[in-house]
Amino acid sequence: MKKVIATCAFAVLGVIALSSCNKDYECTCVDPSGTYTETASGSDAEDACNGASSVLQLKTCVPA
C-alpha cells in the first residue's frame, strides 16, 4: 500500500512540475477605434501583450 501511495504522489508531483503556468496581464491596446485595456496570457507581460497585438499592426498593445 505504501508503494501505491508513493507512486501516486510521485505522478501527481510530476504532472504539477511539468505543467506550464501562464499569468494573465493587462495590456493597453491602441487601434484605429481608440485606446482600451485587454487581458492576455503569457510568460511575461511583454510576451502577453505582443501576443495580443495584431499581425497587421492594426492594433498595438503594451503592458499596462
Image: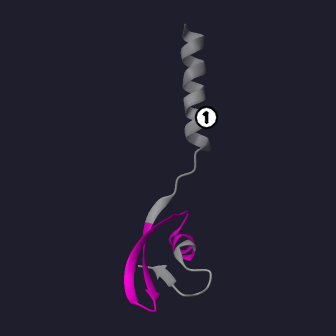
**18 and 2: which is toward the camera:** 18
Find numbered disc 1 in the image and state the secondary structure of the residue it sits on.
helix
Residue lying at the far front in this picture: please name it: 33
**What's under tag 1, amino acid-wise?**
Gly
Which residue is depicted at the point 58% across and 13% down?
4
Which residue is found at the position 62% from the left and 80% from the top? 55
Q: Is 13 above or below relative to 31?
A: above
Q: Residue at x 37, y 82 (%)?
A: 36
Residue 5 spot, x, y in % from top left: 54, 16
Q: Which residue is mark 1?
A: 14
Does residue 26 show up magenta in the picture?
Answer: yes
Considering only vertical position in the picture, is 2 above or below 49? above
Q: How many marks?
A: 1
Residue at image position (54%, 75%) is 46
Q: For this rendering, which residue is in front, 16 or 53? A: 53
| Residue extent of the magenta highlight | 25-50
Q: Nearer the viewer, residue 60 or 3?
A: 60
In the rendered image, residue 63, in percent from the top left (x then y), is placed at: 46, 78
Q: Identify whether 20 is placed above or below 17.
A: below
The residue closer to the viewer here, 5 or 60, is 60
